[in-house]
Image: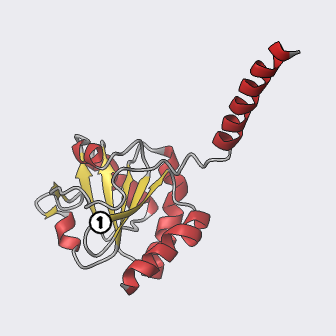
Amino acid sequence: MMRFILPFIVFMIMAAFLYVGLSLDPHEVPSPLIGKAAPAFTLPQLQEPSKNFSPQDMKGKVWLFNVWASWCTACESEHAVLLDLSRQNLVPIYGMDYKDKRQDGEAWLRERGNPYALVVSDVEGRVGIDYGVYGVPETYVIDKQGVIRHKQIGPVTPQNLSEKILPLIKELQAK
């Protein structure tokens, strides 16, 4: 009987870890960038490549930074949410077309609508690496000091927008 106790205890410990692991949200992967300054970059604008954009341009404002691509199927599902948020004019949304051809990104926005105040083009994906992009879409809430306060992995949904992102934005805007 005693020889079964140790395996049973090990089994119960493993079952507890599995139970906890299954209850976690895969979209909430902790990011080492939370609470740190958003990585600096200067990239050309998607629709006006002769003009550049840098996060420094947003100092003093709370904003969303959404990483997307024309080849991204999950970006389709969040696009309507971003369009609706843009119409509400609650927070400026800046986009980064990630590892995409300029003409494909432009066509995608032309066909589906453009929720962004401005879109930059990260053809090489280097800025995405600096931001720790796992895959697109990903969205960052950046505060007035240029610090990343939240990272949403995967599509922005009405639920995570209303439960997490918008309350955080309102809190940061009030500061």
Horizontal side of residue 127 vs 21, given as left or right: left
Q: x, y (%) of residue 25?
A: 60, 49
Q: Residue at point 21% right, 65% down?
A: 55
Crowd band around label 1 with a 10 angstrom C-alpha radius: few (<14), some (14–19), many (20+):
some
Q: In this orientation, which residue lies closer to the viewer: 114 or 107?
A: 114
Q: Residue at point 20% right, 60% down?
A: 45
Q: In this orientation, which residue lies closer to the viewer: 41 or 117?
A: 41
Q: Tag 1, which secondary structure?
A: loop
Q: In this orientation, which residue lies closer to the viewer: 16 or 68?
A: 16
Q: x, y (%) of residue 115?
A: 40, 68
Q: x, y (%) of residue 161?
A: 54, 68
Q: Quadrant of residue 51?
A: bottom left
Q: Quadrant of residue 39?
A: bottom left
Q: Quadrant of the N terminus?
A: top right
Check the image and name the residue furthest to the front.
Answer: 2
Residue 37 visible (yes or no): yes
Q: Quadrant of the C terminus?
A: bottom left
Horizontal side of residue 78 vs 121, given as left or right: right
The amino acid pointed to by label 1 is Val
Q: Residue at point 39% right, 77% down?
A: 91
Q: In this orientation, which residue lies closer to the viewer: 91 or 101?
A: 91
Q: x, y (%) of residue 94?
A: 32, 65
Check the image and name the residue furthest to the bottom.
Answer: 174
Q: Residue at point 51% right, 54% down?
A: 155
Q: Quadrant of residue 96?
A: bottom left
Is 55 situated above or below 41?
Answer: below
Horizontal side of residue 85 vs 67, given as left or right: right
Q: Which residue is mark 1?
A: 147
